[in-house]
Amino acid sequence: MASRLLKRLIIPIGWTLIIQILLCLPGSAFPKSDLFKIPQLDKIVHIILFGGFVGFWCYYLSLKNIPMERLKRLFFMVFLIAMANGIILEFIQRDYIPNRSFEEADIIVDVIAAGIAYGICNLKLLKTST
């Protein structure tokens, strides 16, 4: 059932919307909980969000009947979009979202997570083509 669900466009679109919503919520929207006091929890969340973004979009695209060279370019485009999104959202948080802040470390984590997911997707693509 999970693989059938992952084949649907709603998953990567939904994940994309989740990122936009979570990273644009004002700081006051998050509950005051000890869970949020876990050191570097926000970095783990960024890894999951941006690695998931690349992973879900690349998986969805890999199921389409797209020639290998074009698929590689699309994977790279997904990676670039993830990077740009992470960078832009940090500036939006700094300038427009109350009680949110700009963190260079978040951008670095977003890029690393997207890059790792991009690499994994390309490795899987190479394995399936042989």
Image (tube, rainbow, N blue to C red):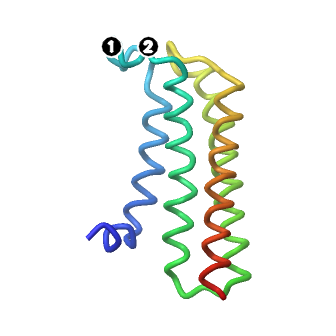
Relative to 94, 55 lies left or right: left
Vertical relation: 97 (above or below) 116: above
Q: Nearer the viewer, residue 23 or 40?
A: 40
Of residues 54 and 2, which is closer to you in this image? 2
The kind of residue on which mark 2 rests is Lys
Q: Which mark is residue 37?
A: 2
Q: Quadrant of residue 68?
A: bottom right
Q: Are marks 2 and 1 in contact (CB under 8 Å)?
A: yes
Q: Quadrant of residue 122?
A: bottom right
Give the amino acid at mark 1: Ser
Which residue position is annotated with label 1?
Answer: 33
**Number of callouts in the render?**
2
Q: What residue sits 71% from the left and 74% below the top?
A: 72
Q: Residue at x 52, y 21 (%)?
A: 97
Give the structural element (helix, strand or loop) at label 2. helix
Look at the numbered disc 1 and give the secondary structure of its residue: loop
Quadrant for the N terminus, please.
bottom left
Name the image quarter holding the C terminus. bottom right
Q: Quadrant of residue 121?
A: bottom right
